[in-house]
Image (cartoon, grey):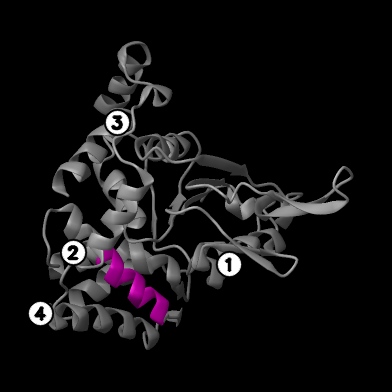
């Protein structure tokens, strides 16, 4: 499967300049069967990344621009009356896709945000007591602006817990930004990307990730990090068991991307700030990532 992974990385690097770690982390979220939350300022390539992944895997792509007047049925779909047949017909919403970009998710009301809870966890939508499965693979990339909070609704802990990891693309370096400008005339546009994988092959890759061996000592290391957050004096709410499972699956995916069929403690150390930080509620204005980095220095490594 190594060749398929390299083809996918190469395809994404043709449109995404200088964001190797961001590409790797997004692929970790995809291959672990989870979802990714991008907390970043506008204009750094979040939409481009989502579109590039959809084009690369020959998957369907949908985008939701979240606003306060967005309704849950605008996301899930609704039943409409068909006068010609005299029956209600289901009109699918944008969640019936492979790659779903939910832009500025914190601008949607809590009621609308909750419409994503079921589909992100169970990959199905229930409307009028009828459940319908969404296509597989199903991958949500949600974005929110960490600077502008006016008119926003913070994501509840249950919603944050649905994302396997949270990351930031960040501003490009000067050389990377110059390369972006040069690609305006000579580079590959996202519409010109050719698929290098099929959705069925992505599902196959996800199955292979689940077979990556994680030794008991590495699992114990994960649990030590997770359980320490629940008794930490600077943390009001620690990581849930779902967070431990997310860290385990993400570690398998990262090892798989590195060409290994076994996980290392270094995989856990690299992923911990991205997988655990957004699941914490610190006290006293502390930054969650700072606390996680301190735990990585205090918890013994197997």
Check if residue 250 falls in the magenta segment.
Answer: yes
In the visual, does 214 lie left or right of 79?
Answer: left
Residue that carries the numbered disc 2 in the rendered image: 267
Check if residue 63 falls in the magenta segment.
Answer: no
Residue placed at 33% from the left, 71% from the top? 291
In this rendering, the label closer to the viewer, 4 or 1: 1
Report the Cα–Cα distance between label 1 and label 2: 29 Å
Residue that carries the numbered disc 3 in the rendered image: 17
Report the Cα–Cα distance between label 4 and label 3: 36 Å
The residue closer to the viewer here, 65 or 11, is 11
Q: In the structure shown, which secondary structural element does the residue marked by tag 4 occupy?
A: loop
Residue that carries the numbered disc 4 in the rendered image: 302
**Start and end of the magenta stretch?**
241-251
Report the Cα–Cα distance between label 3 and label 1: 34 Å
Q: In the structure shown, which secondary structural element does the residue marked by tag 3 occupy?
A: loop
Q: Which of marks 1 and 4 precedes in the sequence?
A: 1
Q: Position of residue 241 (x, y in %)?
A: 39, 81
Q: Position of residue 10 (x, y in %)?
A: 22, 34
């Amino acid at each position: 499967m190594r060749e398929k992974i390299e083809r996918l990385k190469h395809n994404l690097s043709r449109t995404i300049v200088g964001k190797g770690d961001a590409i790797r982390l997004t692929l970790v979220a995809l291959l672990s069967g989870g979802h990714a939350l991008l907390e970043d300022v506008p204009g750094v390539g979040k939409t481009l990344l989502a579109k590039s992944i959809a084009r690369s895997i020959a998957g369907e792509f949908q985008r939701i621009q979240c606003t306060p007047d967005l309704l849950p049925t605008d996301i899930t779909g609704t039943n409409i009356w068909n006068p010609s047949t005299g029956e209600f017909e289901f009109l699918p919403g944008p969640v019936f896709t492979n790659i779903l970009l939910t832009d500025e998710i914190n601008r949607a009301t809590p009621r609308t945000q909750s419409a994503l809870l079921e589909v992100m966890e169970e990959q199905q939508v229930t409307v009028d007591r009828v459940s319908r499965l969404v296509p597989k693979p199903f991958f949500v990339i949600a974005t929110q602006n960490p600077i502008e909070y006016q008119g926003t609704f913070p994501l509840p802990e249950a919603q944050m817990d649905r994302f396997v990891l949270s990351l930031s693309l960040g501003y490009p370096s000067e050389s990377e930004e110059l390369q972006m400008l040069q690609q305006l005339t000579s580079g590959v546009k996202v519409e010109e990307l050719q698929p290098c994988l099929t959705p069925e092959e992505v599902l196959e890759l996800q199955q292979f990730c689940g077979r990556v061996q994680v030794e008991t000592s590495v699992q114990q290391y994960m649990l030590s990090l997770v359980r320490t957050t629940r008794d930490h004096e600077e943390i009001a709410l620690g990581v849930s068991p779902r967070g431990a499972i997310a860290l385990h699956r993400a570690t398998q995916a990262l090892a798989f991307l590195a060409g290994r069929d076994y996980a290392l403690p270094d995989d856990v150390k690299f992923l911990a700030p991205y997988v655990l930080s957004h699941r914490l509620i610190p006290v006293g204005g502390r930054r969650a990532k700072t606390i996680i980095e301190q735990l990585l220095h205090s918890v013994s490594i197997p």
